[in-house]
Amino acid sequence: MEEVRNELLQLAGPSYSVREQAGQYVDRLETAALWVWQRTMAACEASSSEEDRRTAQQLCTLLLTDSEMLDVLLALHDIQAAQLFLSFPPIPTRHGKTCSKWDVPTKHLSTKCRESVQTRAGGKVN
């Protein structure tokens, strides 16, 4: 499990610092998230190997038990939430209240996130 942890931390790199461009930080986090996604999806395929299943199990265990691993993915979540808020600002409803950024249709939101990962990490996402 330590091997999986080290690989994810290496992809995510060091914590954000003021010397680093924000875009580079986001790129690193998205690359790490893409790596996690690819490993877990590989385990879901009918032809998955024992190694794929073991890696996915270790990743799930790490995300549940290792706060540093969880912080990496939560940081990406916070960044994506901020990006979505800029892309889809609250919309006034007919009752004068505003809609949440999460009121965006799921398909459109999914497409936007997938394109972001493909652009930044250069990965193939189905």
Image: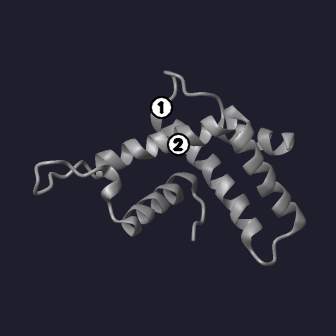
Residue beneath the point at 82% across and 62% down: 53
Quadrant where the N terminus sits is top right
Which is nearer the N-term, disc 1 or disc 2? Answer: 1
Q: Is residue 106 above or below residue 93?
A: below
Residue beneath the point at 46% across and 61% down: 115
Front residue of 98/83: it is 98
Q: What element carries label 1?
A: loop
Within 10 Å of the Cα at label 2, are there few (<14), some (14-19), or many (20+) other Cα atoms? some
Front residue of 73/16: it is 73
Residue beneath the point at 68% across and 53% down: 36
Q: Is residue 37 above or below residue 59?
A: below
Give x and y (percent) for residue 52: 82, 62
Cα gap from disc 1 to disc 2, whole angstroms? 15 Å
Q: Residue furthest top?
A: 18
Asked which quadrant contains residue 42, the reply is bottom right
Give x and y (percent) for residue 71: 61, 35
Give x and y (percent) for residue 86: 30, 45
Quadrant where the C terminus sits is bottom right
Q: Name the residue under label 1.
A: 21
Q: Residue furthest right?
A: 50
Q: Mark 2 points at which residue?
A: 76
Q: Is residue 73 above or below residue 112?
A: above
Front residue of 56/3: it is 56
Asked which quadrant contains residue 12, the reply is top right
Q: Nearer the viewer, mark 1 or mark 2?
A: 2
Q: What residue type is labelled 2?
A: Leu
**118 lies left or right of 112:** right
Q: What residue type is labelled 1?
A: Gln
**116 lies left or right of 46:** left
